Amino acid sequence: MPAAPLRRRCLRVRAWFRPTFGPGLARPSPRIFAACAAAALAVLSAAAAGGSPASAEEIRRERFVASPKPGVAVLASAYYTRPTGLDLISMHQWMSRSDTTDVAFIRISPDHGATWSAPEEVRTEERRPDGTLRRMLRGGCVDAYTGVFLRFRIEGVLPTDDPLEGLRRWTVHYSGSRDGGRTWFVDEQIIHRGPGYTAVRPLPGVEIGKTCYMIGDTASVPLFLADGTLLLPIILTPAGPDGNYVNPGGGYTYTDAAVLLGRWTADRSRLEWEISERVRGDPARSTRGMDEPTLAALADGRLLMVLRGSNDRKPDLPGHRWAAYSSDHGRSWTTPAPWTYTDGTTFHSPSSCSQLLTHSSGRIFWLGNLTPENPRGNRPRYPFVVGEVDRGSGRLMERTVRVVDDRRPDDSPDLALSNFSAREDRATGEIVLHLTRLFARSHGETRDWTADAEIYRIPVRSE
């Protein structure tokens, strides 16, 4: 092959392994880079032999919802509202401080996002005699067995409006709609079935005012089992001997993880709930415990839970993802251990949410942050990657990991590519990623929240 065409193909292949909208400053780990280089070499070898190389796969990005004004970030997500078809619901919220929603909105689209209804405001703040009621939307899903669209939120009354007070006060609520999110026939707090459970004592070991339960982020997506049981991944704060929240790891916060199992009543008017055993971390290895679980079903029927850990305030600890497995449909779980590549090698990942996405092809993808060096707590939250999970072992396939977005030359080191949710596009099979590039404009000690909600379209490569 002449030198010039070969060079052009080299450049196209190099672009294949970075975001198409510009290079970043950070790079994948040497192991990931080696895997990408090997794949590129295979493509070039085929080209040199006279074959046609695979075409470059473009990750496309566009604005989904614009920031309304300086100092405000928009976090958004969208979900199909019916078992079939292209009806969508969009939920977006404005934020100007950590762990607090200023205001939230819901929109409906009957035509796959081509047009949207006028935003309907969801109240996220109410003044109460005992403090400020705060609400935060936590995503939704459609129940293919009943056709009901479910949405979730957390709420709690904070005495002084300090977000950390939520660790003793957050509760989880769900709403159900039979008409694609236009009206809601049920809206209630999730409370364990059986006698003795109340709004104040909603789950075993939880007493609101002393401890809490919550959905960590929109990436903690529900999972339906074959028998119609809904698995909702949550986190809970542990209690000390006096029943009050305790932080044994010494990090910013500390939580255990669990799964809520929901089943419809006979008349399908509401869901009844039970809780799995807790998934507890070792505070000597993860200073914030186990956080923001995400779920997928493996080929042999086991369930995989991938969790956020942290080395917050103990940066000499390795920063990992953690994994636990269930062989009884989510009721009990193995002791969490560092999540690895398929060859058993560990990798670095900051304290941030991640998501397992099960594709219609049966393949499982993982979306989140990997870092070439050991992180320090939450940072850095870039690059953002996608990779495939081996359905047999439940481990990440290193050769499949590719960068979706990364820090750019003009981005702040505080950039956080971490607040997101993802779904499969029913029309194209692409992965649709809703991601906000938080703090890209921050400099020094000044935290600038100004950020649009973005939407990325990620082609799914053939196996």
Image (cartoon, rainbow, N blue to C red):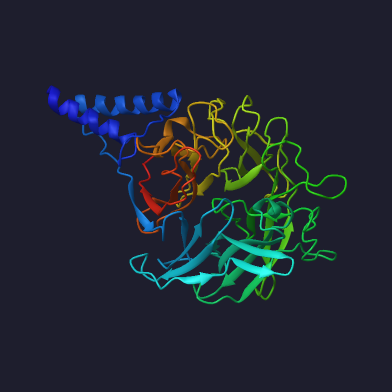
Q: In this view, does 301 lie to the left or right of 254?
A: left
Residue 194 sits in which quadrant?
bottom right
Q: In which quarter of the image is residue 17?
A: top left
**Residue 234 visible to the viewer:** no
Q: In this view, does 322 lie to the left or right of 20?
A: right
Q: Residue at x 59, y 47 (%)?
A: 294
* The furthest residue to the front: 445
Give x and y (percent) for residue 168.
Answer: 74, 54
Residue 425 location in percent, x, y? 40, 56
Q: Which residue is drawn at 45% across and 26% down?
A: 29
State which quarter of the image contains the N terminus: top left
* Image mark count: 0
Q: In which quarter of the image is the C terminus?
A: top left
Q: Which of 141 and 419 is in front in this view?
A: 419
Q: Can residue 48 be seen in this view?
A: yes
Q: Left or right of 189: which side holds 444?
A: left
Residue at 59%, 70% (x, y): give it: 176
Q: Which of 232 and 217 is in front in this view?
A: 217
Q: On screen, 252 above or below 176?
A: above
The residue drawn where x is 76% and y is 37% is 248
Instruction: Pick out the residue farthest to the right.
Output: 241
Q: Where is residue 253 in the image (x, y as percent from the top left)?
A: 68, 43
Image position of 280 with respect to 209: above or below? above
Position of residue 374 in the picture relative to residue 72 (left or right): right
Nearer the observer, 71 or 418: 71
Please name whichever residue, 412 or 41, is drawn nearer the observer in this view of the structure: 412
